[in-house]
Image (cartoon, rainbow, N blue to C red):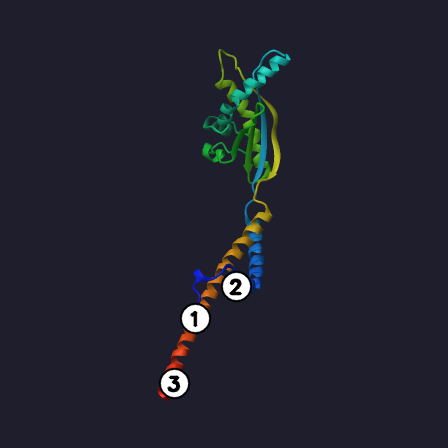
Amino acid sequence: MKSPSTRTVGEYAHILLRGGIVLICAAIAGGLAGWLAAEMTPKTYESQARLFIVAPGSATVSGARTSGLAGQLRASSYRELATSDQLLMRVAAAQWPGIDPGTPPADLRERVVASIEPTNAVLTITTTGDTPQAAQQLSAALAGEMPKLVVEVDNLNGRAPYELKTIDAATDMGVNSPKLLTYIGLGAAIAVVFTAVALLAFSLLRNKVDDALGASNTLRATRELEKSQ
């Protein structure tokens, strides 16, 4: 009998080729399991609000450029403010449609992601929900309350040095769930790997049993020969 360490890659490949039908069936079964898992996974929907950060100034080209640069410098601070307890508590308390006033900030934060674009002063707030409407309601609420909070936080001698202008408040971004092909491919791959391991293990075990039976038969034949002499 060959030990597993002395077997060649070709011998292992031959074992897998002999079990090709089994591997194909495993891939089909795994793919079907992945499809079923995808169908049973709850879908999550996304919505986006985009806000432009500006520093009020003169209505000139240089003034607009200065305003944009100032907004970029402030963007990272506003990104953090978009997921802060201060804003989320304000959103809940304002009783926006679809927002339960008793919702803890931590629960709302799980549904909010804020990002900034490196080349401009645009703050993007992405929200999720069980339905498109739920996601849009939350993004609209954040887009509505964020500019008010910025004015209060950055109030300087009765004047806010920065403002948030709403570009869009509740854009439907569709379903945010793993794609069907991802589930099917992952299910098929896992099934094939486990089946291949099982085939190799079964082949090695069968060789051990065959070798043990062969040794036993040889020993029996030797003893019978010795008795007959």
Where does the N terminus fall, quadrant-wise? Answer: bottom left
Q: Quadrant of the C terminus?
A: bottom left
Asked whether the viewer can see residue 193, the reply is yes
User: Which residue is under mark 1?
Assistant: 209
Task: Identify the residue shown where x is 52% and y is 54%.
Answer: 190
Question: How busy is the neighbourhood of tag 1: few (under 14 within 10 Å), some, or many (20 plus)?
Answer: few
Q: Disc 2 designates what residue?
A: 15
Q: CA distance from mark 3 to mark 2?
A: 37 Å
In the picture of the structure, the residue carrying the numbered disc 3 is 225
Quadrant of the rendered image containing residue 64? top right
Q: Position of residue 158 (x, y in %)?
A: 50, 12
Residue type at the position of mark 3: Leu
At label 2, which amino acid type do we have? Answer: Ile
Picture layout, residue 152 above or below residue 44? above
Task: Say what amino acid the circle numbered 1 marks.
Answer: Val
Q: Nearer the viewer, residue 128 or 179?
A: 179
Alpha carbon separation for disc pair 2 and 1: 17 Å
Is residue 136 in view from this perspective?
no
Residue 139 point in image, percent of width and height:
56, 31
Question: Element at badge 1?
Answer: helix
Of the image marks 2 and 1, the number of the one nearer the N terminus: 2
SS assignment at label 3? helix
Q: Spatial distance from mark 1 to mark 3, Cα to Cα? A: 24 Å
Identified at 55% across, 38% down, the residue is: 129
Question: Mark 3 vs mark 2: which is more N-terminal?
Answer: 2
Callout 2 crowding tier (Cα within 10 Å): few <14, some 14–19, many ≥20 = some
